[in-house]
Amino acid sequence: MKLLSIAIPCYNSEDYMENCIKSLLVGGDDVEIIVVNDGSKDATKEIADAYEKKYPGIVKAVHQENGGHGEAVNAGLRNATGLYFKVVDSDDWVDEEAYKAILNKLSDLVENGEGIDMMISNFVYEKQGAHHKKVMKYHSMLPKDTVFGWDDVRHIRKGKYILMHSVIYRTKLLKDCGLELPKHTFYVDNIFVYYPLPHVKKMYYMDVDFYRYFIGRDDQSVNEQVMIGRIDQQIKVNKIMIDSYDLWSLPNAKLRKYMFNYLEIITVISTILCVKSNTPENIAKKRELWKYIKDTDIRLFHRLRRGIMGGALNMPGRGARRFSLTVYKISQKIVGFN
C-alpha cells in the first residue's frame, strides 16, 4: 500500500501542470500521484497519459467529464489507495525538502503504530509580483513535532485557519465520514477541510513550508472580481457548511470554537463580496443568506452577528462600512485574493 495519495485536479492545465507533477515525483514509490483530467479541452489529457506511461505505479491518469474542482477531488479520493490523502492544485507545487521530511515522518508514525488522522504543515503564498512571500504558520496554535488532540491545541485566534494547502488527511477517515464535494462548484476546498474535522482525533504538526500556493492568474478562482461573479457558488458552499453540523452539540470546546471561527470567516467573505459588488441583486443575496442562517439556527445567527466580523457587516452606517472594509482586508490576507 502506498503511504500517500496525491490528487491533482486539472482543467485546461497544460501550461503549468508539469511543474506540479515534477515537484511531487520526488516522493518516489511512497506516493501515488492521481492526475484527474476534468474534461479539459487542451493537452492536459495527453500530458497526464504521458506521465502515467513514464512513471507506471506512481502516476495514475484519471479522465472524466467536466464536473468542476470538487468532482475532480472526489475522483481523486475514489481512486486513492494510499494511507493518507492530499490535494495539490495543478498550478501549485511543493517544496522538495519539506516534502521528504513529511513523508519520512508519516512513515515513522505508521511504523510505530501511531496512526494520525491529520497532518498539518505550513504553506507559502507565492503571489505573483510580491517580493515578500507570506507564510501561513501554525506554531502559535498547535503543538509541534508530537501527536496531539483537540484538548492540546493552544489559543485559537481568528485569522489562523487550516486550509486545504496545509492539510493531509487519513484516506479512510475521509471515506468513512462520507465526504462528497458538490459538482460544478468553486470554493469547495473549504468543505474539504471543514467537514472531516469532528472525526479527527489525532493530529501532528510539522513547522515546515511545504505547499506553494500560486496566486496571480487573472482567471484564478480567488481573483476578487471572479469571486464576485461566482457569488452564488460561494454562498452555496457557505450554506453547505452551515448545514453540515449542529456545532453546539460538538463535545470538544476547542474544536467547537475553531469550527465557529471558520464558519464566521466564510460568512464574512460571502457577505463582503455581496456588499462590495454594490448591485441590488447581490445585496438581496446577502440578506437572504443571513435570513437562511437565522431560519436554520437562531443561536448561530446571533453568535455570528456578535462576532468581531459578523456583527459590523449587518449594522447600518458609515462607521460599520469602514469596519467592514477592515474585516475584508483581514479576509484578503487569509484567502489570498489577487
Image (tube, rainbow, N blue to C red):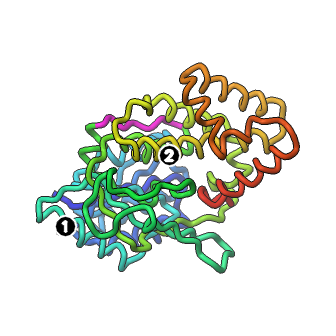
Under circle 1, the secondary element is: helix
Q: How many marks?
A: 2
Work out whether 323 lies above or below 21.
above
Which region of the structure is painted magenta? 177-184
Under circle 2, the secondary element is: helix
Q: Residue 223 placed where, x, y %?
A: 68, 55
In-front residue for pair 198/95: 198
Q: Residue 106 placed where, x, y %?
A: 23, 65
Q: Label 2, label 1: how many angstroms apart (C-alpha)?
A: 27 Å
Q: Is residue 179 magenta?
A: yes
Residue 220 falls in image quadrant: bottom right
User: Amino acid under label 2?
Assistant: Asn
89 displayed left or right of 104: right
Residue 175 falls in image quadrant: top left
Q: Which residue is pictured at 27% across the width and 52% down the height?
A: 117
Residue extending farthest to the left is 112
10 Å crowding of disc 2: few (<14), some (14-19), many (20+):
many
Give the mark nearest the N terminus, 2 or 1.
1
- Can residue 81 be seen here? The reply is yes
Quadrant where the C terminus sits is bottom right
Which residue matches tag 1? Answer: 107
Q: Is residue 193 magenta?
A: no
Q: Which residue is pictured at 32% across the width and 56% down the height?
A: 152
Q: Main secondary structure of the magenta part?
A: loop
